[in-house]
Structure formats: C-alpha cells, structure tokens
Image (tube, coloured by chain):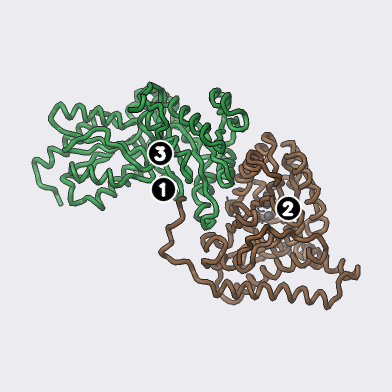
Chain colours: A brown, B green
C-alpha cells in the first residue's frame, strides 16, 4: 500500500486537476455516507475547498514539505496519500498512516513530505518556521507550505510565525484557506476586514489573494507564489478565497448558516466550474465526465473496504512509542 | 581520575552547550538574547547556530519543535519558567505529543531551558517552580540539577536524547561554583544520585533544596540520626529504583522541594513509596514544600518560601522518634 518511490507529482493538465478534485469529493462524500449510516468519528470535511488543495499542491515539487490542519483530507489526497490508509486512520485502524493514533484530525505522512499536522488551531503555524529552518540549514531546494484557516490567522501565533519567518528569511509559503467560517462563527464577526492577505505586508511579506474556487487560478497563483519563495528563500502568503460547503464537522449542521450566502457559494462550486469549462471547451464529454466520477467513487469504495477490513491496534501497544 | 575544574552552574551549562555544538553540527541554540549573552558560542559557531529571536516564546518553542522534527537538534532558552506559559501549546501539544500521534514518524530531540526558584527577588512572574506541570505531560522529560557537574552532564545528555527535555536551572544555584569534570562526561537522564549515605531516614529532593537537605543531614548526624540524601536530578523519567531502595533501607522518607505541595513531584514520589515500599515504612511519609502561594519578591519571604534545613531536620527527628515510641498506626 505504501508508495516507497518518490512522490508522484500531480500532472498539470486540466483533466488531472478535475480527477484530483473528484477524488477528494468522493472521499468526503464517503465520510458523509458513513455518518448517515451510523456512529462514526467526527470529521471536518473539505467539501467546497477542493480547488484550493489541488491548485496549491499541484504546484509543488517532491522535495517540498507540507504542514496542515484539521481540514486536511484535500491536501493529503492531492499530495498522493492513499485514501485507504487515510480512512483507516479516521477509523482508528492500525493500517492508518499514524497507526490509528492520530484519527482524522492529525494525519501526517512523512514519506509524502506531509510533515506535522496540528489540530491546535495555529499549531501548524507555530511549527512551520522550524521546518523551514531545517531546510535552510541542512540544505536542499525544497520549500515549506503551511495550510491554515482564517480562524487560525486570528491566533497570536500567526503573527509570531510571519514575523519570525520574515526576519529569519525562511522559505515558507503560507496558504490561508479563507472559507468564511471559523467553526460556528462567521469570520465577519471576528476579523477586521474580509481578507487575511493584507496582514502579511506589515511583516514585509508579499501576498496574493486568489479565487479559491477556480482550480486553474489557484494553481497559477501557487506556481507564482512558490517560485517567489524558491527564488527569494523568503516567505509569501497566498490567500484562497473559498467556502466551507458543509457544517464545521460531521455529523453536519448548518442551521446557523445564512441560506443566501450558502446558495451563492454553491453556485461557485469548484468542481462544477471546471467541469463546465471542460465540457464547453470540448475537452470532456458527458460520458467521459460520468466515467471520471465513477472512477473516483470506485477508488474510494475500495479504500473504504480496505479500511473497514483493517484490524484495530492492539491495546497492548497503548502506551508504546510515546518516547523515542 | 578525570580532571576537575571549578566553575559556576551557569558556566557549566555553557560548557556543555559548547562541547555538544562542537560535537554535532545539527545542534543550534536560540532565544531572546541568546546571541547577545552567549558571546563565546556565537564566536565559535556563528550566527546561523546561535541566534537571537523575537520576543515571542510560542514561536520560539514551536520553531524548535518543527526544526527538531525535521533534522536539527535545537536548544531554546526561554529565560524564566513562568514564560513557559506562552510556550505551553508548542511544548505540550506539539513536542510532547506528536511523536505518538504520528505513529512514531517524528521525534523531537530538543531542549527547553528555563530558570526558576528564589534567590533574585524577582517575584512570582519570574520565579515559579512549575516543573511538575511538565512531568504530567506525556512525551516530555524533565531535569533539574543541583550541582554544576550535573548541570553540565545532564545538559549533554538532554541534547543527545531523542526526546524533548525541559531543563530547569535553579536561580539560587546559577552562580554557585562547584567541581565540574573537564572531560566529556554525560550524566544519564533518569538516574538519581545518593548525595550522602545514611540508615535512619531518607531525605529526597532536587535542585537547590538538595543542599538544604545536606545541611539538615549534617545537623542530624550530630545528634546521632543518620540521614540519606537522594538527589533526583531527573524528575522524568523518575529513578524509581534508587528511591525505593533507599526507603526500603531506612524505612522513613522526607520529601523536600521548593515547588508547592499540591500535585508536586513529592506527591508522586510519596505515592510511589506507598504503593511499592509500604511494608518497609516505619513511619508516615512527610512532605516539606513551598506553600500554595505565588513566590514573593521580598528577600526574607522569598527565603522562607523554600523549606529550611531546621524544618527538615525537625521532621526527620520526629519520624525517628515516633517509631521509637510507638508501633505504626496502621
Ligand atoms: C487552539 C484551538 N482553539 C479552538 C479549537 C476548536 N476549533 C477547531 S477548528 C476551529 C475553527 C478553525 O477555523 P479556521 O482556522 O478558519 O479553519 P476551518 O475550520 O475554517 O478550516 C475551531 C475553533 C481548536 N481546535 N484549537
Ligand atoms: Mg475558516
């Protein structure tokens, strides 16, 4: 199951970008289905944010490293993580990437360069400069990408992280997925201004805001941002303007969401947008599209079967591996 | 015999840092004023490996954790123990937990240095013996040495260890001189030291109050009471074997620390003795600790905060007398 070869880089053509997004959507929909069927661990899905994940990760190289947060399935899958081992982790099985000790919220996959995932909101921001310091001091061309939310930007550690990365010239690409929500609170209630990107300038960091529901636009912006970081060995902040289409976590509740806002954003669904573009351009037929959907669902069904058939960890190992 | 040289606790730590940085190019140190204050290290190892940081403890500790997980071996100076409150998430939730939570994919070989304890009249926001908090946190190790030799040897061990280590320096000892081996001597983590042998009562302590216990043992000896003094040196992992062997020998234990009593290290040691050496006890376990109060600034109050030699001797005397007079109450 575990790929031991170097990380396969997502190919840049539009069909591949679509396939990568469909895989994420199918994965998240499987989680929703698990919840509908009975008790299942709480999960924060990334439905609606697939373009941000695929657009950014497709712009990275094998030697780059990623830190992420609780809403990480898209980042992991886009990077090439096995959905079976991810679902196994969510379901607490020993075949999970973290042997069932992480659960959904903290999946790291070192072999894919997904180093350190934190569910302490802002945790990933606290760790990113250190990972970049290792890169800076131990050599290598790689850059460090840190995914975080608009809520995390309200933590003090966001500001500490940007300031340090700037004064120490660390190669961090900060990627804020501004999905308008911070758990059960709209960002309008908690943030000065609508955007996080302007918060970079006082720290001497260049930034860019991109339509986070347009995967091609995100990819283009991410290629630009990553190139900047590679060249200057300095941080950059990319803000993807997007929307959390489901409740904060499964089981799902959106009773507190303004239906008009939700409807407006559903009309900008990142997958539907790329599909329309591809159909219009004649790069895809409706049959071809149906086949892509079926493929994605099939892969996730197989992954789910693998996860469900996997054993639980042995309780005898409960307290092992705490110390090196 | 190894050559011994006189140096202060503070200089012993610096010597350990110097030796370990020379030994392993992955070791680096940073903190608020580190490059300014540690001129020798800066000169020897340059500005990449000896760095001043912004005044931001959270990101200092987080950066150390991120760097440790990806190939470096950072030592961070967080100055005074109460400032660790700003770094709790990074130390406890990241450095301590992410090895286990990642299924062993990452290790966090890092050292966080902080000073605490009475001696400089700095008051409770610079002086707070909160070492037990970290003992309670999985994945972290905690040392608090009592002598310059241990300060050097334990710092070397802490830097070489694959796990995060909280290294507490007792302010009251910082400039106390002592004999330190010149050679590359590592004091292993998790090993207590018998500072004085005795047969009637065991005085168990760490850091500054080890010396208070030694003074009490001296006074007791003059009265014919033979006290053994155990210096824990490492609070986690705790050297359970040494503690239990000593108490099984003497049958009496007095636990002494400057940190306050509730859920302190003494409580853990007392529970250990009660659970595993109950049959050897000739008298109840006694704890002498700081009060449940913020550390005061005023010098006499600050001094009174930590257990005194007189009180330790009196407690030991009572334990010995009590068993001479009466059978155990249980
Ligand atoms: C330190 C901390 N505070 C609160 C939480 C609870 N919590 C989990 S996710 C979340 C919202 C985070 O919002 P954002 O950073 O915008 O990410 P999003 O969930 O929108 O992807 C909150 C409050 C937490 N996990 N950690
Ligand atoms: Mg958000």
Q: Give the chain of mark 1.
A: B
Q: Is mark 3 on a helix, strand or loop?
A: strand
Q: Where is residue B316 in the image (x, y as percent from the top left)?
A: 19, 36
Q: Mark 2 points at which residue?
A: A61
Q: Residue B143 has which mark?
A: 3
The residue positioned 51% from the left and 34% from the top of the image is B23
Distance between mark 2 and mark 1 Cα atoms: 41 Å
Q: Residue placed farthest to the left in the image? A: B325
Q: Which residue is drawn at 74% across and 45% down?
A: A237
Residue B9 at what x, y percent from top left? 41, 26
CA neighbours of label 2 inside 10 A, class few (<14), some (14 to 19), many (20+): some
Residue A256 seen in the figure:
no
Q: Mark 1 points at which residue?
A: B136
Dividing the picture into quarters, in which one does residue A165 lie?
Answer: top right
Residue B59 appears left or right of A234: left
Task: Between label 2 and label 3, give the one nearer the viewer.
Answer: 2
* Mark 2 residue element: loop
The lab-note entry on whether marks 2 and 1 share a chain reads: no
> SS for tag 1?
loop
Q: Which residue is drawn at 67% across and 65% down?
A: A254
Chain to which mark 2 belongs: A
């Amino acid at each position: 199951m575990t790929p031991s070869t170097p990380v396969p880089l997502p190919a840049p053509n539009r069909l591949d970008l679509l396939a990568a997004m469909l895989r994420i959507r199918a994965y998240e929909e499987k989680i929703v289905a698990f919840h509908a069927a009975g008790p299942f661990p709480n999960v924060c899905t990334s439905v609606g944010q697939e373009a941000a994940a695929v657009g950014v990760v497709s712009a990275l190289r094998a030697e780059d490293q990623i830190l992420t947060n609780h809403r990480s399935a898209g980042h992991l899958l886009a990077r090439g993580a096995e959905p079976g081992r991810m679902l196994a982790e969510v379901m607490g099985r020993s075949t999970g990437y973290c042997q069932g000790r992480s659960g959904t919220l903290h999946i790291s996959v070192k072999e894919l360069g997904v180093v350190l995932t934190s569910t302490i909101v802002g945790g990933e921001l606290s760790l990113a400069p250190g990972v970049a310091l290792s890169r800076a001091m131990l050599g290598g061309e790689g850059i460090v990408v840190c995914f975080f939310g608009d809520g995390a930007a309200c933590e003090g550690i966001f500001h500490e992280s940007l300031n340090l990365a700037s004064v120490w010239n660390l190669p961090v690409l900060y990627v804020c997925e501004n999905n308008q929500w911070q758990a059960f609170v709209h960002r309008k209630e908690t943030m000065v201004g609508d955007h996080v990107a302007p918060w970079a300038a006082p720290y001497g960091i260049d930034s860019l805001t991109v339509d986070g529901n347009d995967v091609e636009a995100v990819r283009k912006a991410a290629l630009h941002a990553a190139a900047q970081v590679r060249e200057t060995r300095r941080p950059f902040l990319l803000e993807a303007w997007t929307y959390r289409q489901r409740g904060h976590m499964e089981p799902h509740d959106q009773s507190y969401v303004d239906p008009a806002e939700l409807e407006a954003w559903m009309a900008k669904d990142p997958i539907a947008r790329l599909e329309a573009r591809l159909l219009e351009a004649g790069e895809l037929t409706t049959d071809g599209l149906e086949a892509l959907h079926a493929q994605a669902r099939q892969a996730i069904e197989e992954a789910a079967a693998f996860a469900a058939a996997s054993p639980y960890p042995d309780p005898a190992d409960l307290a092992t591996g705490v110390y090196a | 015999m190894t050559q011994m040289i006189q140096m202060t606790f503070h200089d012993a730590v610096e010597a350990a840092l110097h030796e370990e940085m020379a030994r392993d190019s992955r070791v680096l140190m940073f903190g608020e004023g580190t490059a300014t204050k540690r001129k020798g290290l800066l000169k020897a190892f340059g500005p990449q490996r000896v760095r001043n940081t912004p005044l931001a403890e959270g990101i200092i500790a987080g950066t150390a954790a991120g760097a440790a997980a990806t190939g470096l071996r950072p030592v961070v100076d967080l100055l005074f123990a109460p400032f660790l409150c700003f770094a709790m998430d990074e130390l406890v939730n990241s450095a301590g937990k992410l090895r286990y939570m990642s299924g062993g994919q990452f290790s966090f070989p890092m050292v966080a240095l902080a000073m605490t304890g009475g001696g400089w009249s700095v008051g409770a926001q610079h002086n707070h013996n909160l070492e037990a908090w970290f003992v309670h946190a999985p994945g972290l190790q905690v040392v608090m040495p009592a002598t310059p030799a241990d300060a050097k040897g334990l710092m070397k061990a802490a830097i070489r260890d694959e796990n995060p280590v909280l290294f507490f320096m007792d302010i009251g000892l910082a400039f106390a001189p002592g004999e330190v081996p010149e050679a590359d001597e590592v004091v292993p983590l998790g090993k207590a030291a018998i500072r004085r042998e005795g047969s009637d009562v065991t005085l168990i302590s760490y850091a500054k109050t080890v010396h208070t216990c030694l003074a009490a043992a001296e006074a007791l000896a003059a009265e014919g009471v033979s006290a053994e003094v155990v210096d824990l040196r490492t609070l986690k992992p705790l050297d359970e074997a040494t503690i239990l062997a000593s108490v099984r020998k003497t049958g009496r234990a007095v636990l002494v620390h400057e940190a306050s009593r509730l859920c302190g290290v003494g409580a853990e040691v007392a529970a250990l003795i009660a659970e595993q050496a109950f049959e050897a006890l000739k008298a109840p376990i006694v704890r002498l600790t700081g009060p449940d109060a913020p550390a005061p600034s005023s010098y006499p109050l600050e001094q009174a905060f930590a257990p005194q030699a007189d009180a330790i001797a009196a407690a030991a005397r009572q334990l010995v007398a009590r068993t001479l007079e009466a059978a155990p109450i249980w």
